[in-house]
Amino acid sequence: MLYQNFSKTPVLAAAATSLLLLLLLSSTAHAEAPMAANEATEVVISASRIEMARESSGSAITVLDSDYLEQNQVQVVSDVLRDVPGVAVSRTGGAGAPTQVRIRGAEANQTLVLIDGIEVNDVASGSEFNFAHLMNLEVERIEVLRGAQSALWGSDAMGGVINIVTKRGKGSLNGKITVEGGSYDTHQETLAINAGTDDYHYALSGTLLNTNGISAASEERGNREKDGYKNATINLKSGIDLLDNLSMDLVVRHVKSDVDTDSFLGGVGAVDSDDNTETEQTSGKVSAKLDLLDEQWHHRLSFSANDTDNTFFTAGTESYNSQGYKQKYEYQTDLFLYSSLTNSDDLEHRFTFAAEHEEEEFYNKGFSTIDRDMDVSGYVVEYGANIDDRYYATVAGRRDINSLFQNANTYRLTFAGWVTDSVRLHTSKGKGIKNPTLFELFGSTPDYTGNADLRPEENSTWDVGTEYHFNALDGYVDLTYFHTDVTNLITGSGQTSVNMPSDAKIKGVELSLVLRPSDNTRLNSSYTYTDSNDGNGNELVRRPEHVASINGSYLFSNDQTRLTTGVQYNGKQDDIEYDANWNTSTVTLSDYTLVNVALTHQLNKHIELFGRVDNLLNEEYEEVLTYGTKGINGMVGITITGSL
């Protein structure tokens, strides 16, 4: 059923129509190629489905590059997301424990997660991506796009997009080996090889992580059993130029994990138990790109799939199983045209059209066996204008045709402009939609029963910000106000899910600072204030009002030793408490501050020694009610690089 004939999908019909229309338009195209982004600027893909400079987008975007990740010795990607304005992270225990990421108060399954262009949200688990298993394996950059992005990316992007791009192979064949170990009997081994020329590239990497961990249920509440974690991840990224204007790319990723967990009881919360969860996720994408008219007209055709299998065990016996599969066919075309406003001002037009067809299948074996599926076709049109590399505007609209719900229309508008050489204004407005997931509709676990009467969630978001650039310090400071209205918000009620009867409202302020005053020094800082209301006067749970971070890195004069220090503050937040009958009430969790320190020393051209200490002040805290967190802990290791 899922593997239908590709030629029968609506994508190819839409692609053929688009090609015919754009061939007629292309006769007016100017001979020059589209302007490239300044190489010194941060490049993003998620903002408009094409590569562009961050400053060219009116959306609120944060980019964390590989230098930032390596300087902080990031092991798990979710840890570094705490440094991003507008982002809140919640982990239910130690390494491998379910980890949620929320953007601007949106629910975790309202954030679309892309890894090398593959949508990896887990159909088997509420269409939410579990960040617990995402290792920092050769990550080139992380883009965090905030606000409703459904017009570009569909249902899962109601709250925002997190786009993760891994490194591309380059140069002669070379490799890297990293071995590290430390607290909680943790050890990790990583191997990466890559190569690339103008005609081809490939990068293959893998990592093994093993730790005895901490108790998932809080030790402060009397739980002492250690809950271990194992993770094996492998990633392949490759491509080849078949012709001067035709290329093909292949990405494959496989993650296998096994995490010990604890039970959750009404009236008690998390308690020690002999439970564990095994997860396998395999994802892949094959795509082709064709450039015409001196690279002014791009065409992309792709197929991607993501398959996740979660199996839950109690005392070694399988208790239930949840599987999800999603496949997606996609065609996208981008046409660049040029004209002049005056003798000195140029106007660049960009027209983007995309057609998508995706199919989801959900299988749940628990108290009963459930096998359901859903398919969605989406059509995207976006117009972008660039006036003399100073003012930028986009208008986007999308139509989704859904097999289970009413068809939906979404939109997004953005504007960015330099009012002086140092001051940039940016603003965006959009409508988002999030369909109830197959798990929310039909799922069944020992603690949950789906609700087939759920209605799609909708939101309206807007933001406006001012960014001031310090040319002498190679950086900027940005202040942004955001506002979100949510209709039909889906929330837990007892052991099921319901739509909230009242509209929820979320508003706040984001402040971010990025400075690189010298080649040896970097400073990043962020602060977010979030005011959330579920429509009944209650604060939305796990959305702290205040979140802040500061992170600095300094390379000493010997050009070999680097010290990086980060401080992350998470303010008070509400969480859910259950009584013995699963009735809910709210409780306030205390604020906490984490201090992390990392040190690296480049011994010679091929060998680097490193070490880090996390939670240096040994802070005691809970991110989720009754679940444990790590005390002071550290790791040391060595990285060896060289040509092969």
Image: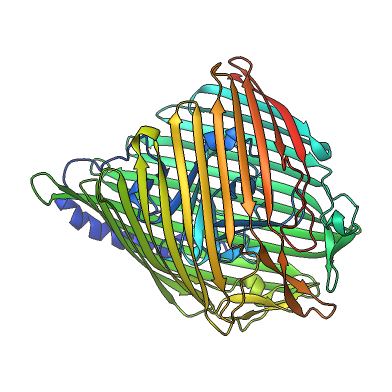
Q: Measured along the vertical axis of the image, is residue 345 above or below residue 455?
A: above
Q: Which residue is drawn at 81% across and 55% down?
A: 216
Query: Colour mode?
Result: rainbow
37 up-or-down from 579: above or below: above
Say which quarter of the image contains residue 217.
bottom right
Q: Locate residue 595 relative to residue 318 in the image: left or right.
A: left
In-front residue for pair 586/395:
586
Up the image or down, 497 lies above or below 91; here it is below
Q: Residue at x 69, y 62 (%)?
A: 323
Q: In which quarter of the image is the N terminus?
A: bottom right
- Quadrant where the C terminus lies? top right
Q: Looking at this view, is 163 or 523 the one in front?
A: 523
Residue 105 location (% of width, % of height): 56, 65
* Occupied quadrant, residue 437: bottom right
Answer left or right for 499 relative to 217: left
Whether residue 118 is visible? no
Rendered position, 577 above or below 337: below
Residue 94 x/y as whole percent: 77, 50
Towards the viewer: 3 or 292: 292
Image position, residue 505 (x, y; %): 51, 74
Residue farthest to the left, as pictured: 343
Is residue 215 visible to us here?
Answer: yes
x then y, percent, for residue 234: 65, 40
Q: Looking at the rendering, which quadrant does residue 537 occupy?
A: bottom right
Tell me the residue at 17%/42% (across/down).
Answer: 31
In this rendering, position of residue 499 left or right of residue 272: left
